[in-house]
Amino acid sequence: PHGSMFARAAVSTAARRFPQRGLACRALRRWRLAQPGRRVHTGVCVASTSFSDDIRGYDRTASSTSNNNTTNPTRPSSGVTVSIPHLTALLLDLNNEGQHIIRAVVAKGDLVVLDKNKKNDKHGTTELDAQTEADRRVEAHVLRALRSFCPDLVVVAEESYENPTAVIQETDTFDDLTHLNKSVLAPFPGGKNAVVPKSYFSQRAMTMDSERSSHDSSISSSKPPLDWPPHLLDEIDTSRVVVFVDPLDGTNEFAGGARECVTSLMGVAVDGTPVVGIIGQPFFENLDDANTRLGRIVWGGRGLGIFGLDVTPRHLTDDSVELSPKQLTCCINRATKDDRLDQVIADLNLDVLHKVSATGFHFLLLLEGKADCALLLRPGTKKWDSCPGEALLRACGGSVTDAAGRLYDYGNAKYALNKSGLVSTRDARRHFQLVSAARGVAMRNERHNEVLSEVPNTFSYYPLNVSDKSIRNSITPSVIMADAGSMVTKYHTVTESTRTQKATAPPGGWRALTVDVGGCLLTPKEKVVDTYMRVAKSIHGLDTARVTETKILSAIRSGFKKPVPHGNPEGIRYVGDGRSFWRGVVFDAMGGELTDYELEKALNLLYEHYEKPTSWHVAPGAKEAFQLLRKEGIAVAVVSNWDTRLPTLLRACGFDESHFSHVVVSAEVLSDKPEARIFEIAMERINQSIIREGGGNTITASQVLHVGDSTVNDVDGALKAGFGGALLWNSTPKTGAAFDFAEIAEAILQSRRV
């Protein structure tokens, strides 16, 4: 129904087939025929010559330590980096140990309950905010271990955050816990990333790609590697990482004897986004495991999936799921009183199956499919409650936002309270039904209170009337319109004489999405320098002493700064299969003394490597997000500076006509981003499809959102063409970037429903 994917890009091939390597594209032939007797001018490529902007699709070695925390943009780089897989492995072991400590405290017979809450709810009754000995001792144990792992790491833990003057014991022998099997307690790490995984869970977390794990003796080679997103495999500056810990969530339920609701929560946020979530359930009865009768760990993250659950999560594209709001089952907080919540439940006819004051348990119910949503339409939860669950729900097609549908930022330890409420859903397609209902109730109540106001303030209702500094910036950057009419983005320096304007969605919302490939949709699994070094070693007679990482990177940078190859149209880097460009780069990267035979061998080996789908990591959630958007009537197309092999590679990586209607590559249309022409061609082709398929009104440039990884090629280029521009997160942090395409899809769909 979507027509033939990449029809224009499939040069000299039948429909649904793709260009063969080495074929010159029709556009180039037309260009050459139109230049009789004209000498080709090898002009400088108009695309960005910056290494970080233009080579991101081919290299992951340039990791930035700049900060992306939208709530704390001035937090300085620490100069200390940590491995997210190693950190995750440590947290998994600590979560397992914490569960044993919690059960041992219970077995001792006295929880030593304290009430932290001195406030009353709106009905005048005191809400218990319990803290037990288990809370205190587990958190102290976790903090001591994390301090041994990396003292520069920012850790936000519930008990120490709420009582920062409390003294944390330097040691705890746990001798009084006679029911604790101390053999489960692993020695603390001996330094940064010095983690020896103890439990099965932690060993699994550190089974990274085979190249990396082969150099780490602590990692078992018997397990298949996890598909960690490449940008999380690189060590990350601690200024960009925040760890959230709730040693015992659901303490009120725990103190009241409802042990099954107790969870131990741990989450990792990078650049303000939850990327890893761990939920331990110490009193879960594991009837299938005779050796482990009590306790389980559910963990995972963005791009990893979920571990520890047998339930298969629903995907965004599952057509078998009925979306009627009458079928939604709901979790709410047992102790929280809120009239708006009652109205939303009534408006949507929600079935409240679970009234439990335990956010972590709510997330488990959603993950297991025992509930569809969880609602809290007032301040109450904290970041340590929501960070783990958000990472897990988003890993399987769910969504977590505030009560207005906005994302929280987890990058600043100061703003732990979720002031704007919390709405969580198992299926992101249902999410904005709930958010719209919540906003509708709040607006209705506010307007009722205004009564005689002739001009109601539509932003005076909760949570839009709350100053919440932990709300993330929009994924679309501010547009700066200079007095002279030029356009740049907020990522560049501007003078006081300029005026700013938000690049919000157009009336009616976004109608089309265009997507960059290199460093955005596809990222190499292996570092480019490692690939080049491996190829160099395979060429007999090549002096590998002349081939170093520094020289390889220098050669690639220089290659992108040089004029385009002789014979190419002016400013066009890739023609045909791109060999005219890469031949010079490879020659310099291999030491500059290759024979023609050696050069062709090296080039062939590199081409063979990058033509394999196993060499690339597909952006998490991209396929599901694109299919969802297309089913919702949103056009999706690729716009990329690439050679004519791209359609074949995309097909090999699992993309087809259900994901894209068009693939526009620079080598075919002879226009490189950030030039406006390549974007305009994409819009023209989308409109041709709309007309051909009778799909209604054609789109305008302002209705198209382009997503990429480069501020120059993607955001600036898109804005120049009249598109909206947004960034996808990668190893170089940029303010306001979306972490994955699921967030992009949510923003697009929300723009059409507001």
Image (spheres, rainbow, N blue to C red):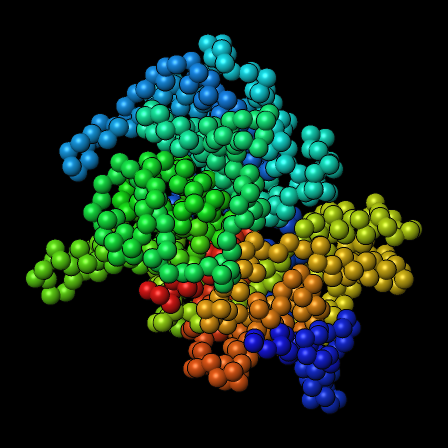
Q: Residue at point 55% right, 16% down?
A: 181
Is residue 90 rendered to the left or right of residue 282? Answer: right
Toward which corner of the image does residue 600 lie, by quadrant? bottom right
Is residue 332 rendered to the left or right of residue 511? Answer: left
Circle count: 0
Q: Position of residue 725 (x, y in %)?
A: 47, 65
Residue closer to the observer: 538 or 12: 12
Q: Is residue 237 visible?
A: no
Toward which corner of the image does residue 570 lie, by quadrant? bottom right
Q: Position of residue 619 (x, y in %)?
A: 58, 55
Q: Residue at point 67% right, 61% down?
A: 653
Q: Residue at point 49% right, 61% down?
A: 320
Residue closer to the observer: 253 or 278: 253
Q: Residue at point 41% right, 21% down?
A: 134
**Which quadrant of the figure contains the C terminus?**
bottom left
**Which quadrant of the figure contains the N terminus?**
bottom right
Is residue 162 rendered to the left or right of residue 561? Answer: left
Check the image and report above or below for 574 versus 266: below
Q: Is residue 21 visible?
A: yes
Q: Position of residue 630 (x, y in %)?
A: 50, 69
Q: Residue furthest left?
A: 452
Is residue 113 rendered to the left or right of residue 722? Answer: left
Check the image and report above or below for 81 versus 573: above
